[in-house]
Image (cartoon, helix red, strand yellow):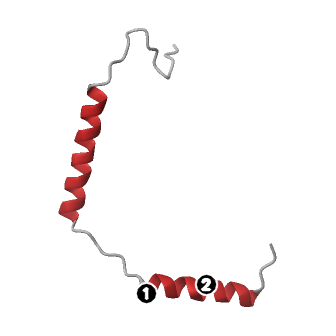
């Protein structure tokens, strides 16, 4: 793909203009932290209820 300096400048200007038009809302840190903790607890509970047979081998090997 051949890209001239003028086309590159046009793309960069339009990209920065689009980024400037749409300010990203900054969520409160407490809400993010609590949401992450809730997801972690939900995932841990789902993993705890999943039965794993005793014959299941680990994905790694112990070598001496």
Q: Are marks 1 and 2 in contact (CB under 8 Å)?
A: no
Q: 59 left or right of 13?
A: left
Residue drawn 36% across the image and 17% down it = 52
Percent position of residue 27, x then y: 26, 69
**22 shown above or below 6:** above
**Separation (CA) of disc 1 from disc 2:** 14 Å
Instruction: Say which residue label 2 marks.
Output: 12
Query: Which element carries disc 2, helix, strand or loop?
Result: helix
Q: Secondary structure at mark 1?
A: helix
What residue sits right under mark 1 in the picture?
A: 21
Most extreme residue toward the top is 55
Residue 17 image position (x, y, % from top left): 51, 88
Quadrant of residue 4 in the image? bottom right
* Residue 8 circle label: none
Split into 4 quadrants, where in the image is the N terminus?
bottom right
Residue 5 in picture, x, y percent from top left: 74, 87
What residue is drawn where x is 50% and y is 84%?
18
Pick whichever, 39 or 61, lies toward us: 39
Within the image, what quadrant is residue 47 found in? top left
**Depth check: 14 or 64 in front?**
14
Foreground tag (1 vs 2):
1
Q: Residues within 10 Å of mark 1 (few under 14, many from 20)?
A: few
Q: Indicate the quadrant where residue 58 lies.
A: top left
């Amino acid at each position: 793909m051949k890209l001239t300096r003028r086309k590159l400048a046009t793309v960069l200007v339009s990209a920065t203009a689009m980024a400037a038009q749409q300010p990203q809302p900054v969520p409160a840190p407490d809400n993010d932290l609590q949401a992450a903790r809730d997801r972690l607890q939900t995932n841990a509970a789902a993993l705890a209820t999943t039965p794993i047979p005793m014959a299941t081998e680990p994905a790694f090997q112990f070598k001496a």
